[in-house]
Amino acid sequence: MFNAIVIEKEPHYHARLATLSEADLPKGEVLVRVEYSTLNYKDALAITGKSPVVRQFPMVAGIDFAGTVIASQSPEFQEGDKVLLNGWGVGEKHWGGLAEKACVPANWLIPLPAPLTCQQAMAIGTAGYTAMLCVQALQKQGIQPDKGKILVTGANGGVGSFAIAILAHLGYHVVASTGRPSETAYLQALGAKEIIHRETLSAPAKPLMKEQWIGAIDSVGSHTLANVCASLQYGGVAVACGLAQGMDFPATVAPFILRGITLVGVDSVMCQKNDRLLAWQQLANMADALHLPQISHEIPLNDAINTATALLKGDIQGRVVVKIP
Ligand code: NDP
């Protein structure tokens, strides 16, 4: 028997800490003893039911996890291997990582990259991995540190915090946009050189605005992303990965056709395995520079449901790592 955060929709949508048996687990090639998981924005949506993230019920929540292989029918993994998983619909349509055990196809797992521990991997989690994919997207478009400033929106969130830390480590000049200017010291410690209030970006955008940054990583969407695009310098690149303000994108084509800007989308869920391996190896190589103790804090599995509500209210800073008993 093992514990898990289970989401059910009968008699009404709810999440609870439940006891399951191994026989309940979905079929998969690799059985993992989960050691750490995390609480992401998407997990909070799933646990609270605020958005239709969960596609099958009952569902075990948790879109990422790290742990040790207990049993494997795949030659890729042996008992005792340390592994991690992000996305692939886990916690949405396949039972996820907010549980003591998980059973998944082998090709969804990647070996834990040295020198990371399971705890460090989940302190980074889907947020850090997504931030790294966003930075790689900027680099692929030729945005190097000497080209200009990079704006990071949703700065106090998981993706935003890691985007700042990674960019600063790579030598970029980072401008952090936040609704919590009281956290200026935290953002500066991560490496932000300038802090702006998110209200300057959250109202409906004009087609073109003053050119301010050569690149941007946006986890907010909606009017904020429209403002980001309208204020990119000529030839600038915005990377969109989130929707904390909203899923809409009320922009005009003006910055695209008059300033030649590029908007790149990043998806961490179905991302190709080679890109994942590269992102995680780079994260592992710079782990010491990622301020993991400052960015993340740990909670026990039985606090995950309450913390999900606080996270959606914007009351949580950085990453929530869930220690699995
Ligand atoms: P968090 O909740 O940790 O952070 C979101 C941050 O956005 C908040 O901390 C806040 O930052 C800011 N924010 C919240 N509400 C608003 C608002 N109404 N207007 C403007 N800013 C707001 O979430 P994550 O960092 O984990 O995720 C951020 C987004 O990225 C989510 O939408 C998530 O779904 C998405 N995401 C997408 C992935 C992908 O594969 N594309 C993977 C991971 C996440 P502050 O207080 O500094 O203003």
Image (cartoon, rainbow, N blue to C red):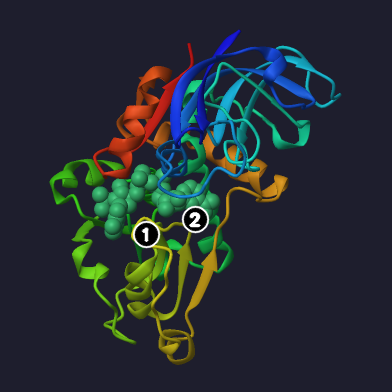
Q: CA distance from mark 2 to mark 1?
A: 16 Å
Q: Is the residue marked 1 within 8 Å of ligand 1, measured from its CB?
A: yes
Q: Name the N-terminal-most of marks 2 and 1.
A: 2
Q: Nearer the viewer, residue 311 or 129?
A: 311
Which one is in front, 127 or 300?
300
Residue found at the far bottom of this picture:
258
The residue at 71%/45% (across/down) is 273
Q: Amino acid at mark 1?
A: Val
Q: Secondary structure at mark 1?
A: loop
Q: Nearer the viewer, residue 76 or 322?
A: 322
Quick check: 305 left or right of 29? left
Task: Tell me residue 165's x, y (percent).
Answer: 37, 45
Q: Residues within 10 Å of mark 1 (few under 14, many from 20)?
A: many
Question: Label 2 neighbourhood size at 10 Å, few (<14), some (14-19), many (20+)?
Answer: many
The residue shown at (47%, 63%) is: 240
- Mark 2 belongs to which amino acid? Val
Q: Are marks 2 and 1 in contact (CB under 8 Å)?
A: no
Please identify the quadrant where the N terminus is shown: top right
Does the image show residue 88? yes
Label 2 vs label 1, nearer the camera: 1
Q: How many marks?
A: 2
Residue 236 rendering spot, x and y as whole percentages: 44, 75
- In which image quadrant can residue 30 be found? top right
Q: Which residue is mark 1?
A: 220
Circle 2 residue: 135
Q: Splitting the image into 4 quarters, where does residue 154 fall?
A: bottom left
Q: Looking at the image, which residue is at 57% across and 25% down?
A: 66
Q: Is residue 58 left or right of residue 71?
A: left
Residue 181 in the image, given as x and y percentages of width and height: 15, 51
Q: Secondary structure at mark 2?
A: helix
| Residue 159 appears in the rendering | no
Task: Name the mark on residue 43.
Answer: none
